[in-house]
Image: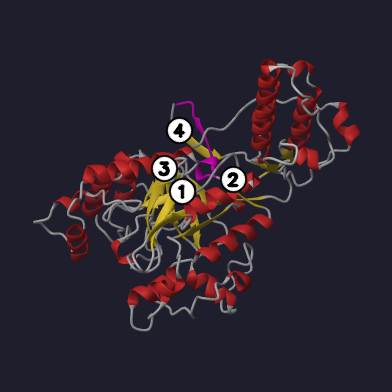
């Protein structure tokens, strides 16, 4: 059982002077929640600005094809700007409007740009000391299949402790959103500069959000769909839908293959599509991958080719069931999904190839493991500077890493600059001279259950565990 495992372009554009008409209209955005809802009875976008009482010129019936095309282009600009502003990119939204054709004579666009500027002026900086980081494993689709027999089945008992159900994830996501939590990317936390000697220096970035909003980082570990998950009610792999968006394949108990939102990635994608203000400038989460069973449900590891070597029973059985196995096809399929995920705002991290205990293995084992990740995972997901340690382990005590630590020096040589562990603290972020450390809080069955029954109290700042707990989850048994 896998246990306790575990930037983006920023727009920098100019400000606009507030127009007197904004104050005259009484447009005050206290929460800064500019919501975008596409469509309506009149075919126009229902925007947060319109909902706040400000009206904008409605395109009149076009006199011909040229005017009709201009109206559509204008509406597309307005909708794109609205979505950018809803995700707190006010400068980007304003720049898009002011660069649009006809802006100088379009009072609607001018009022919209001024309104975004007004919201921006209300924003306050996020305290980096109060950015929490939460993480999940693969979500349970069918609790009966995942948890049944836990008294005699160690896998089922582990599932109950370490996994979150879809219903729990959806409730957590909604309640955190309702409480004002906004997802930020882990690299959004970092301001990278260069000192007088040309050395890279890390410092806390300046993230501005409306009052009442709180930033958090989200990650998911082990998105590999290990063989040990088979027949336990988890998705089987990530795939792409007809629009090229990441979704999941799920194998029902009778063997039927279906596709849908059965794990964190497509569920969160859909939530942010509906609630763009749940994400800071399109940020999603950090996906921490091992490699020994492949990634994303594809058997991409070269160990599957070593049929006459030291290959375990799970792999032997899988290969026997898939005589047409082609590793290059597996890798190509995984890369398509990974590329689509990155395009959608997701980032990838190493979780070590073999899910190793970083504090217990020697340097030679770490070097072997890192090379395996480089050979089998990096070509598919691309390079990363982030590593998420498994089993709650780390390279050292909290604070600056010791330069004398050979494993730390080796990982730095390999390009890692973002280091994450598992931590029960509400907030745990440390900026080294040129690296970031952050602790992560596991929102799993163990933590939800024991908070729900009152034996723990360490997630109440995020949600009410009593209302989140899946009624189909049996009592959690502690697994060492």
Gap in angstroms between the C-alphas marked 4 and 2: 35 Å
Please give the residue where the numbered disc 3 appears in the rendered image: 417
Gap in angstroms between the C-alphas marked 2 and 3: 31 Å
Q: Which residues are magenta?
A: 185-197
The residue carrying pointer 3 sits among few (fewer than 14), some (14 to 19) or many (20 or more) residues within 10 Å by Cα, namely some
Gap in angstroms between the C-alphas marked 3 and 1: 14 Å
Gap in angstroms between the C-alphas marked 1 and 2: 18 Å
Give whichever of 7, 167 is nearer the camera. Answer: 167
The stretch drawn in magenta includes residue 187: yes
Please give the residue where the numbered disc 2 appears in the rendered image: 273
Residue 353 to residue 71: above or below: below
Which label was assigned to residue 274? none
Q: Residue, x 51% and y 45% (percent of image)?
A: 186
User: Between tags 4 and 2, which lies in front?
Assistant: 2
Give whichever of 149, 16 is nearer the camera. Answer: 149
* Left or right: residue 311 compared with residue 431: left
- Indicate which disc, 4 or 2, sits on the residue closer to the N terminus: 4
Gap in angstroms between the C-alphas marked 1 and 4: 23 Å
SS at circle 1: strand
- Asked if the residues shown at circle 1 and circle 2 are in contact, with their CB atoms under 8 angstroms apart, the answer is no
SS at circle 2: helix
- Indicate which disc, 3 or 1, sits on the residue closer to the N terminus: 1
Quarter of the image for the N terminus: give it.
bottom left
Please give the residue where the numbered disc 4 appears in the rendered image: 200
């Amino acid at each position: 059982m896998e246990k306790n495992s575990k930037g983006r372009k920023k727009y920098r554009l100019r400000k606009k002077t507030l127009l007197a008409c904004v104050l005259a209209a009484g447009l005050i955005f206290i929460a800064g929640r500019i919501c975008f809802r596409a469509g309506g009875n009149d075919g126009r976008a229902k925007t947060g600005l319109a909902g706040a009482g400000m009206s904008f010129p409605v395109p009149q019936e076009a006199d011909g094809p040229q005017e009709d095309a201009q109206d559509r282009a204008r509406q597309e600009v307005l909708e794109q700007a609205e979505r950018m502003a809803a995700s707190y990119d006010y400068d980007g939204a304003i720049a898009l409007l002011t660069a649009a054709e006809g802006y100088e004579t379009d009072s609607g666009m001018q009022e919209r740009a001024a309104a975004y500027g007004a919201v921006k002026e209300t924003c306050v900086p996020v305290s980096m000391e109060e950015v929490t980081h939460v993480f999940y494993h693969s979500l349970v689709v069918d609790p009966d299949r995942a948890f049944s027999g836990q008294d005699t089945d160690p896998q089922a008992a582990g599932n109950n402790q370490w996994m979150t159900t879809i219903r729990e994830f959806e409730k957590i996501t909604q309640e955190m959103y309702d409480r004002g939590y906004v997802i930020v990317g882990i690299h959004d936390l970092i301001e990278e500069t260069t000192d007088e000697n040309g050395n890279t220096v890390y410092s806390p970035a300046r993230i501005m959000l409306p009052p009442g909003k709180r930033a958090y980082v989200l990650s998911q570990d082990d998105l590999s769909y290990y063989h040990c998950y088979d027949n336990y009610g988890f998705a089987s792999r990530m795939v792409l839908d007809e629009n090229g968006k990441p979704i999941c394949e799920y194998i029902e108990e009778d063997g039927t293959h279906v596709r849908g939102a059965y794990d964190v990635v497509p569920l969160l994608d859909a939530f942010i599509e509906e609630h763009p203000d749940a994400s800071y400038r399109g940020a999603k989460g950090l996906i921490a991958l091992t490699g020994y069973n492949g990634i994303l449900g594809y058997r991409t590891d070269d160990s599957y080719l070593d049929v006459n070597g030291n290959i375990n029973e799970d792999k032997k059985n899988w290969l026997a069931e898939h005589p047409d196995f082609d590793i290059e096809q597996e890798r190509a399929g995984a890369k398509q999904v990974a590329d689509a995920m990155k395009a959608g705002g997701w980032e990838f991290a190493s979780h070590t190839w073999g899910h190793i205990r970083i504090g217990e293995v020697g340097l030679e084992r770490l070097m072997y493991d890192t090379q395996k990740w480089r050979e089998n995972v990096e070509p598919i997901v691309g390079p990363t500077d982030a590593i998420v340690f498994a089993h709650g382990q780390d390279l050292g005590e909290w604070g600056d890493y010791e330069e004398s630590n050979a494993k730390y020096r080796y990982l730095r040589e390999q390009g890692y600059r973002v280091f994450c562990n598992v931590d029960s603290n509400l907030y745990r972020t440390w900026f080294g001279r040129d690296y970031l450390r952050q602790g992560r809080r596991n929102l799993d069955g163990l933590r939800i259950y024991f908070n729900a029954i009152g034996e723990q109290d360490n997630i109440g700042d995020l949600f009410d565990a009593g209302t989140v707990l899946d009624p189909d989850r049996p009592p959690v048994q502690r697994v060492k």
